[in-house]
Image (cartoon, grey):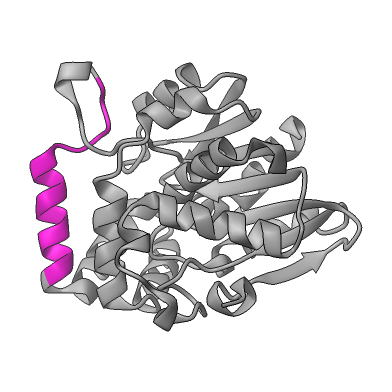
Amino acid sequence: MRTTRRNAVTLTGNDLGQPMMFAHGFGCDQNMWRLVAPAFADTYRLVMFDHVGTGSSDLSAYDDMRYSTLDGYADDILEIIHEYDLWDVVFVGHSVSAMMGVLAAVKQPERFAKLVLVGPSPRYIDEPADNYIGGFGREDIESLLDSLDSNYLGWSSQMAPVIMGNPDRPELGERLTNSFCRTDPDLAKKFARVTFFSDNRDDLLKLRTPSLILQCSDDVIAPTAVGDYVHKHTAGSTLVYMNATGHCPNLSAPEETVDAMKAWL
């Protein structure tokens, strides 16, 4: 199956420019980049897509085995890159997609020029034995997933504003809630388990592609300690602390996000 259909791939911007590939986080789709991507359209060839199970992707392409780990999603990214013969890719990944980008770049580093990791987390669960702070206890994740399983729409309306983290701007939480509601509930539940139980800490040590880490303040999903960890364990990385609050600066602070990216690029 061509990735164009499977992942609803769209290409815009400068056809002769360096490829810039945008990957969205859990419960979202490529529309989450609508306030950021246009700022790069004059210079870059913009590549956007939906993970299988989200947005306009082909739901029939979902395979339990393939997508049982983040590697399956990373393989999708590489297949898109190969189908369109993309080289020197600037990969921009939000949340869990940041780790997908890391996995893809470790597998085929020759295809990537730089990574922009927005709110990345290699491990969401605390690991006291390793002195690692991920932000959640295992029981927290189990409770979160149980709630998601029992009432996905109710979970979405409660969690989206928390994830967005801008209580004074409730319209942002509503946008994220609407995005969650456009995601197939059954596949979202599976994606959530893969996301929140993933552990990609060792993969950071293998990465050799220059990386920018954008760390928001008051991010309940990827707290500052996580951003610090990613920076410390990723060779050649640059860490930028943003004034933006919450976990989705691509929606809540697009101008600051664009400025930070352009300054580094």
Q: Is residue 12 left or right of residue 192?
A: right
Stretch of the chain drawn in magenta:
132-149
Where 219 falls versus 44 (above or below)? above
Where 117 falls versus 79 (above or below)? above
Q: Is residue 178 left or right of residue 238?
A: left
- Point out residue 254 in the picture as x, y percentages from the top left corner: 62, 51
Q: Between residue 30 and residue 34, name the one nearer to us.
A: 30
Is residue 69 visible to us here?
Answer: yes
The C terminus - image quarter: top right
Place residue 191 in its image quadrant.
bottom left
Q: Between residue 11 and residue 252, name the one nearer to us.
A: 11
- Point out residue 115 in the picture as x, y percentages from the top left corner: 63, 38
Q: Residue at x 52, y 39 (%)?
A: 102
Q: Residue at x 64, y 62 (%)?
A: 80
Is residue 23 visible to us here?
Answer: no
Q: How many marks?
A: 0
The N terminus - image quarter: bottom right
Q: Is residue 241 left or right of residue 63?
A: right
Q: Between residue 68 and residue 179, name the one nearer to us.
A: 68
Q: Residue at x 88, y 57 (%)?
A: 42
Where 253 falls versus 227 (above or below)? below
- Point out residue 13 in the picture as x, y percentages from the top left corner: 82, 63
- Point out residue 59 in the picture as x, y percentages from the top left corner: 41, 80
Place residue 90 in its image quadrant.
top right
Where 82 falls versus 96 (above or below)? below
Q: Between residue 159 and residue 85, name the one nearer to us.
A: 85
Q: Is residue 214 left or right of residue 40?
A: left
Magenta stretch, overall SS: helix
In the rendered structure, does residue 28 fall within the stretch colored magenta? Answer: no
